Amino acid sequence: MGTPLFPGLGRHCSVSDCKLLDFLPFTCDRCDQVFCLEHRSYNTHECPNANQQDVTVLICPLCAKSVRLVPNEDPNITWESHVNTDCDPSNYQAAVKKKRCPVPRCKETLGFSNTIRCRDCTKEHCLKHRFGPDHNCPGPQKTNAGGFPFVGLFQKNKKDSKPSRNTCGPSWWPTSLSNAASNVRASAEASMEKLSIGATQAFHKAKDGMAPSSSGHVERVHPKSGPNKVTLDICPKCNKAFRDPVLLVKHVERDHGGTSIAK
């Protein structure tokens, strides 16, 4: 075997009728024996373990499920185990039923190569009825106006004049929000009106209770006098107030040269 320099080079074929010395032998992955180029296949050297790693699957006629046969086991035992544990006859119709075109009176079976999904109604049809007019397509689905999902809620809320207070869904909160905003605005306006009245009263009190009238007189209101009013005359020169007109005349003659006409 081999050469003087390489005595372990090459091996003989395991077939008894061959025994050929092959320098590039083949090792069978089933029986682990060495064979030459001619006898390397399972059939040529009649490998006893040729079917050891094969996968055999049978379709159950009751449930349409696949049943794998176990190597080195009687197929009858494998079948009986499947029928007692995993077999479900109700699954047969769902597995065997073929999908067909939904167009009335169309018997075309839908497969991988003849199925078209409509972009508008999102239904699958055969090639013959792939266009919208052929399968009476209802058209694309309508979306909310403006792309804002809450617009429909506001429009629906306008139609409902008296929404229920016990409802906690999204149909009542736009009205509650609007009512709350209106109440806040009314409260703010009332507060501003009260503040304006208070400011006006404070301004009159700052003038020490004196308010000039259109006739040149001043009406003084004493805090303890109540509704009683005292009429005062105003000097047109220096705006001094006098309770007695005679005193006003004397003041004008003494301090302003005897004339009461403002220059």
Image: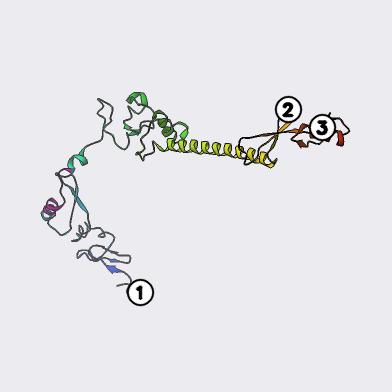
Magenta stretch: dominant secondary structure: helix
Secondary structure type for disc 2: loop
Q: Position of residue 77 (x, y in %)?
A: 11, 55
Mark 3, other Cα within 10 Å: few <14 / some 14–19 / many ≥20: some
Mark 2, other Cα within 10 Å: few <14 / some 14–19 / many ≥20: few
User: Horizontally, is 173 left or right of 222 in the view?
Assistant: left
Q: Please, what is the three-letter code of the amino acid marked with disc 2?
A: Ser
User: Horizontally, is 23 left or right of 202 in the view?
Assistant: left
| Front position in the image: 187 or 171 | 187
Q: Which residue is mark 1?
A: 6
Residue at position x 55%, y 39% in the image: 191
Residue at position x 57%, y 38% in the image: 194
* Mark 3 vs mark 2, CA separation in Å: 17 Å
Mark before the other along the chain sequence, 3 or 2: 2
In magenta segment, residue 208:
no
Q: Which residue is mark 2?
A: 215
Tag shown at residue 89: none
Q: Which residue is mark 3?
A: 249
Q: Please, what is the three-letter code of the amino acid marked with disc 3?
A: Val
